[in-house]
Image (cartoon, helix red, strand yellow):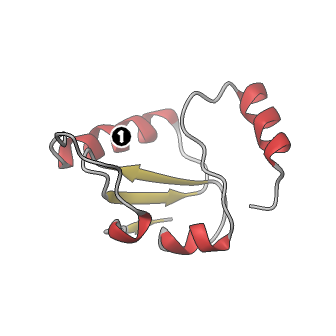
Amino acid sequence: MDDSQEDVEKFVKEMGVHYTIVMGRDSVADAYGGVPYLPGTFYIDRTGKIVDRVFGLAGHGDIEENIKRSLAQGAAPVNASTPTPEASKPQEQKQ
């Protein structure tokens, strides 16, 4: 989490990343239950609850399956605001 915004933007462009990237300090990582090492992926259901988190590299198939499982866990909210990280604690940690 020590990279500058410019470094991250360059990496995202080079790697063709088309999903949300979060940058933050240790306080942000702590709000999400801690980030022991990078990369870290948080799977969030339709209600905004963190339902899983994975640290380390993962294959395309694993990521796709985790996304499908996460989206299936929560119903789509109606006019709901995005919950704060403190309201969403992970249920389980995979390593």
| Residue at the spot 49% in from the left edge and 58% down from the top edge | 54
Q: Nearer the viewer, residue 56 or 10?
A: 10
User: x, y (%) of residue 52?
Assistant: 37, 58
User: x, y (%) of residue 19?
Assistant: 54, 33
Q: Nearer the viewer, residue 2 or 15?
A: 2
Q: Secondary structure at mark 1?
A: helix
- Amino acid on which the number 1 mark rests in the picture: Ile
Give the quadrant of the N terminus.
Answer: bottom right
Q: Is residue 14 left or right of residue 76?
A: right
Q: Is residue 73 visible?
A: yes
Q: Is residue 76 left or right of residue 90?
A: left
User: x, y (%) of residue 33?
Assistant: 48, 73
Q: Quadrant of residue 24?
A: bottom right
| Residue at the spot 46% in from the left edge and 54% down from the top edge | 42
In the rendered picture of this protein, how many numbered marks are placed on residues? 1
Q: Is residue 75 left or right of residue 88?
A: left
User: x, y (%) of residue 53?
Assistant: 44, 59
| Residue at the spot 64% in from the left edge and 54% down from the top edge | 39
| Residue at the spot 69% in from the left edge and 67% down from the top edge | 25
Does residue 80 lie above or below 55 as drawn?
above
Q: Residues within 10 Å of mark 1 (few under 14, many from 20)?
A: some
Q: Is residue 35 visible?
A: no
Does residue 6 lie above or below 25 as drawn?
above
Determine which residue is flagged by label 1. Answer: 67
Q: Quadrant of residue 71?
A: top left
